Amino acid sequence: MFRSLLIANRGEIACRVAETAKLLGIRTIAVYSDADRTAKHVAACDEAVRIGPAPARESYLKIEAILAAAKASGAEAIHPGYGFLSENADFAEACAKAGIVFVGPPADAIRAMGLKDAAKAIAEKAGVPIVPGYHGHLQDAEFLAGEAARIGFPVLIKAVAGGGGKGMRRVDKAGDFAAALAGAQREAEAAFGNPAVLVEKYVAAPRHIEIQIFGDTHGNVVHLFERDCSLQRRHQKVIEEAPAPGMSEGLRAAMGEAAVTVAKAVGYVGAGTVEFIVDGSEGLEDAAFYFMEMNTRLQVEHRVTEEITYTDLVAWQLCVAAGERLPMAHGVFDRRPIAAPAQSMMSPSGHAIEVRLCAEDTENGFLPSTGRFDRLLIPSTGRLREDFGALEGHTITPYYDPLFGKVIAHGDTREVALQQLRTWLSRFEAIGVKTNAAFLLRCLEHPAFIAGKFDTHFIERHLDALIAPDDAAARTAEALAVLAVLIDRRKESGGDPWDLRDGFRIGGVPGAEDVAFVGLGAQARPIENGFAVTLRSGSSLAAPHPEVPGPRLSRAAAQPPQDEGRASKDAGEERRVAILGGRLAGGTITAEIDGRKVTGGAIVGPEDVRVAVGPRSFRFALAASHVLDEAGVGGGRAITAPMPGRVVQILVKPGDAVTRGQPLGVLEAMKMEHTLRAPGDAVVASVAAQAGDQVGEGAVLIAFEEE
Ligand code: ADP
Ligand code: ADP
Ligand code: MG
């Protein structure tokens, strides 16, 4: 076994690889870009080497910089994680040339599976079914449109060099084909430097079911059963589980065998995943399955397989890379060599489910969210696996992808695993970065998902319900926000932090106090051990109040607030709550509200109060600062870049009349393209950016004429 390992990655996967390396006593070396100097993965390793500036191209994707770091630190092997250089055959070769072991398959196998069209040809030749389509080299738009018509709509256009759901477009009718093709080619060229695409039949009621395979250098290849990754958004996995709900023994055996056949066809060594698309329209019993692609690396969702097979796949990778025989069903501490590893020795046990936590604004088109985790409460139950790449106080930058953590539950049954995850998610809190946690919880609560009745359209089909606001949480948040302000005022006036268990009086004189947020006013009247609070939604109480901290000039109120407005959608509504026994310490706020104990997160700032109620976060702008903004600070009518990125396209010119929702341009950031849409009907006054421009957050891209 190696004595030292450089981990050429970041975030949760770098931390996860380091965890196993440490169990094996291996010295770990992290690499980091300037954006990651204080990142979790840097602290998780024994040593760390800077490899360059923030952009991945200049750091995590820079082969020379990584090899130099490996040499400088004396690393014997390099684990590439997933993404970045993990499927880069040139990197695997460069490692070998430098005398360093690449923990992954041979370069030839990576190359063979690197392009989707070539991979399909290999599968087909090996007798494994592939989706009907055109996988040839001709790229002429008219020819491809003809092929699409021949295949029959709906079809899927895929970048042959694609990955991460990029360069992919579903086309439902002939009229949409040309535009979709152009979009896919543009995205493919930008992301992979290769615009080539293939066109294939879009499978009905698609289930994404993949097989984990493992090979060693002694010619053994086994599979470790399936994972169902059908819960996807824009062709990207969101929730994964094993076994696949409804899986039959027969289909599992057939798919497992097909996966091993494909792996053997390319002399595969190490961890790999063979992805299949399964037609689930008639259930899985005798379903047709088709080879989609092979990922020649460790997968994000590998933990799900580890849970049901009691294995450590990173330990397996390291053993295989060190030349050992497949350790089969043995864990990290039990790697007795087995003369002839046999598939029959493997058996799945229980049910595992993983959710991917991403920094994204689910209510705003899943736009990636950047910022600092001013609060990040990662519940620790001791029963689930929590793989995180960030901690409280860490910043999500726009440079890398939005996945910051994943949580994996394993139970005897699917029901138990689901229950564990739901409870975990309902306790998770984040403030400062928007996350998809509440959305994930909604997915796990959905009756169709619970019943195991879903395909890859599940999220799209139920989107409205999955992103709908939660009124009960909003009401709790309102009360907690008012309470947080009251507590904060007492701290400011030099008093002890308010602790109502000890009783409470305002300077001995009972009197009413007002708290005014934008769209929400509250009057708090002291009662024994607390307050009787009257909350009033709507504008009438939202006037600036002298007791409100500030006023200060702020950008905050001009930015779209997290859930503001939603929290008080019924204008003019009035309600009363009794808040007893309150405490705010270390960002945690507790109180008894209407006879119910409530705990959340709260951060009181000069311009706002941010509250987390479980996985939902809310922002309440203090009224005084907002009024200044309305008076002209930052209130111009313009489209600004929601995050730093590259302008891909501008679709309008000065003088154009646009309607609400109309696409105005495309910005690429955090590996995704984002369509910028008109916030209302307007006339374009000027365009301040053009295709190719790098723009900073808040940069004005398009300005509109005043009404
Ligand atoms: P998995 O199948 O392991 O879930 P994903 O498709 O979600 O893989 O990709 C894993 C990670 O690697 C994601 O962060 C994704 O953005 C990134 N990724 C995948 N393919 C590529 C690629 N070709 N180039 C760059 N990043 C990629
Ligand atoms: P990537 O490299 O981006 O992972 P894949 O070829 O694995 O690309 O496809 C990504 C996803 O797109 C799949 O998980 C599946 O949900 C969907 N998909 C791919 N091919 C088809 C198809 N022929 N019919 C229906 N859905 C498909
Ligand atoms: Mg895939």
Image: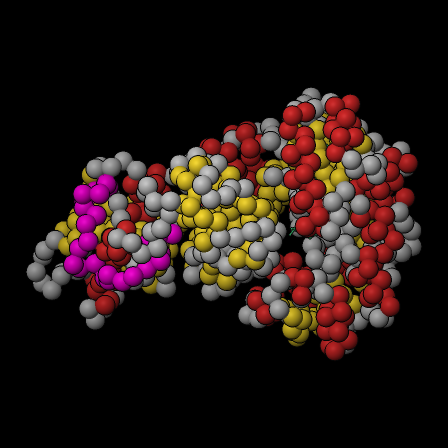
Q: Position of residue 641 (x, y in %)?
A: 48, 52
Q: Quadrant of the C terminus?
A: top left
Is residue 383 covered in magenta? no
Can residue 258 be seen in this snapshot? no
Residue 461 sits in which quadrant? top right
Question: Magenta region's main secondary structure?
Answer: loop
Q: How is the image coloured?
A: secondary structure
Residue shown at the point (30%, 38%) measured from the top left = 569
Is 376 or 696 nearer to us in this picture?
A: 696
Is 390 or 196 nearer to us in this picture?
A: 196
Residue shown at the point (59%, 50%) measured from the top left = 691
* For residue 72, above or below residue 13: below
Is residue 544 covered in magenta? yes
Direction from residue 244 to residue 362 in the image, left or right: left
Q: What's drawn in magenta, residue-wise?
A: 533-559
Is 670 or 451 nearer to us in this picture?
A: 670
Q: Position of residue 425 (x, y in %)?
A: 49, 47
Residue shown at the point (72%, 65%) measured from the top left = 62
Q: Position of residue 50 (x, y in %)?
A: 65, 73
Can residue 301 be seen in this snapshot? yes
Q: Quadrant of the N terminus?
A: bottom right
Residue shown at the point (90%, 44%) measured from the top left = 265
Direction from residue 441 to residue 290 in the image, left or right: right
Q: Position of residue 404 (x, y in %)?
A: 56, 55
* For residue 316, above or below residue 572: below
Residue 182 sits in which quadrant? top right
